[in-house]
Amino acid sequence: MNDFEKRLERAVERGHQVRQNKNQEAIEKALSEEELRRVHNEYRLELSEYIDQCISRLPQYLPGFKCQSIVGDQGWGSSCSRDDVGLDNDGTRTNFFSRLEVVVRPFGSHHVLDLVAKGTVRNKEVYSRGHYRLLTEVAMADFKEFVDLWIPEYAEIFAAS
């Protein structure tokens, strides 16, 4: 293949890419607010069920945790918490609270799917994680992968405390 044919081939590829970009822009504009809300709800349902399945396994490895579903203004997902009693540095009785919460935030004006995790161990917030994508760019496998990373990360931090 000579130089001219290579340039011609690259030009055609660039043209195809421009057409794909224009098609994607047209699709994004065509999605109405209601359509975006519907898409968000579908993603939210799938992801919140997955979160619930994953978090419900935590008490098998960290006894004493109690799990519950979260549905409300803060979002949809699940949490797992535990209360412990122990001695403080000066020997007085103290209550310790530990909690992991993973939720999908409600639909908003930015048209994103927003996943948030917060972890508290023995009354101290040890991490806060977040991941979001435009609804038109969501890859559910990526969101599930973050859930799969964040829950064991919390378990490791809790077990080390």
Image (cartoon, rainbow, N blue to C red):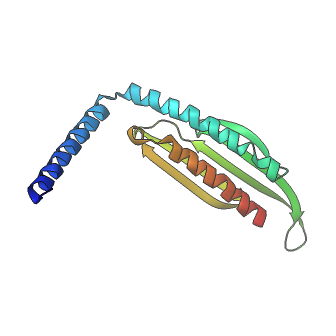
Query: Residue at the spot x=57%, y=49% of the render?
Result: 145
Where residue 116 sits in the image (x, y, percent)? Answer: 56, 48
Count every numbered label the image shows and give the total: 0
- Compared to residue 5, the image places residue 114 above or below, namely above
Viewer-nearest residue: 115 or 11: 11
Query: Residue at the spot x=62%, y=60% of the render?
Result: 127
Query: Residue at the spot x=69%, y=39% of the render?
Result: 53
Going by the picture, which residue comes out furthest to the left? 4
Q: Is residue 89 left or right of residue 30?
A: right
In which quadrant of the rendered view does residue 6 lie?
Answer: bottom left
Q: Is residue 109 left or right of residue 102?
A: left
Residue 82 in view of the camera: yes
Give the position of the C terminus as an image quadrant.
bottom right
In which quadrant of the rendered view does residue 36 lie?
Answer: top left
Give the position of the N terminus as an image quadrant.
bottom left
Viewer-nearest residue: 105 or 38: 38
Where residue 84 sits in the image (x, y, percent)? Answer: 85, 56
- Compared to residue 161, the image places residue 135 above or below, namely above
Going by the picture, which residue comes out furthest to the bottom? 90
Q: Is residue 21 left or right of residue 129?
A: left
Q: Is residue 75 left or right of residue 125?
A: left
Viewer-nearest residue: 25 or 37: 25
Query: Residue at the spot x=54%, y=35% of the render?
Result: 44
Where residue 35 sits in the image (x, y, percent)? Answer: 40, 26
Where residue 96 sits in the image (x, y, percent)? Answer: 81, 58
